[in-house]
Image: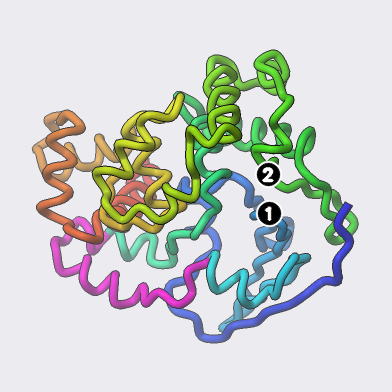
Amino acid sequence: MVKNMEQKYIIENQESFNSVHIFECGQCFRWNRQEDNSYTGIFKNNVINVKEEENKIVFTGICKNDIKEECIRYFDLKENYENIKNKLSKIDEYLANSIKYGEGIRILHQDLWETLISFIISANNNIPRIKTIIERMSKNYGQAIEFRGKQYYTFPTPEELSKVTVENYRKLGLGFRDVRVYETVQKTLSKEIDLDKLRIETNIDLLREELLKIPGVGPKVADCIMLFALKKYQVFPIDVWVKRVISELYFENQEQKPKIIQKFAKEHYGELAGLAQQYLFYWRRDTA
């Protein structure tokens, strides 16, 4: 069990940062609201509580490295979201209105391995169940970290999952995803899936092609991995909510196929399509 000293990092007057918008927009599964309306989550070897106090954002937690460096990277604090929102708001009134609704969204810079497995688990699943499965997997195979008298668990590495069987995954509630997760772990251990190569690939088409070779990774999951773990802002993940909002707003309620929506998003939103998707997704799902 990790028992490091608690660290704190405080930023003031940070624009474009709202904990509810960030943690409830569907991009992550290991952050939970506390009784005081703060959020506590775990990423990599860090357990952090995020609390907004007037004009301050207070990060407190147990970190393997410096908490400031970890938070700047994970919360993408060097990215100017005000500029991004200004650019996107000029595209059309629909996007401008959705940005006003979710003005505090930031795309988290999540770990590639955890994002890969988490979104394989997310296929045909709902968020509460996804969170429960990931928590069970982490508790059974990850490392314990104590924070404020409670046990948290790191997401297990490929090595920590090396001897986990399909039956073990089934007992965790993965359902049909058990074989896919098992195969992905084994292929990662054998380097058939090369995470380092995926991290440095700059060509979107080649990156998507490689991701689609992974068991359980379809177009939507591939795009989620690229957006949430690899900062490829130009990708546009399409799920039922995104399909619905684009069809409603831009195609007179006529449901469109993913290829048509992808083409529309690329032409309409350009290099910031992924961020446009998050604002539209959060607004449409939250106001449904």
Q: Residue at x 65, y 82 (%)?
A: 10
Q: CA distance from mark 2 to mark 1?
A: 8 Å
Q: Earlier in the sequence, mark 2 or mark 1?
A: 1
Q: Position of residue 84 (x, y in %)?
A: 29, 71
Q: Secondary structure at mark 2?
A: loop
Side of 132 where 98 appears, left or right: left
Q: Residue at left 43%, top 73%?
A: 16
Q: Which residue is mark 2?
A: 155
Q: Is residue 95 above or below residue 5?
A: above
Name the chief secondary structure element in magenta. helix
Query: Mark 1 highlights which residue?
Result: 42
Residue at image point 45% right, 25% down: 216
Image quadrant assignment for residue 35: bottom right
Is residue 227 or residue 165 the one in the foreground? Answer: 165
Three-letter amino acid code at the position of disc 1: Ile
| Type of amino acid at the residue the image marks with label 2 | Phe
Depth check, front residue: 65 or 250: 65
Range of magenta residues: 75-97
The residue mark sitting in front, 2 or 1, is 2
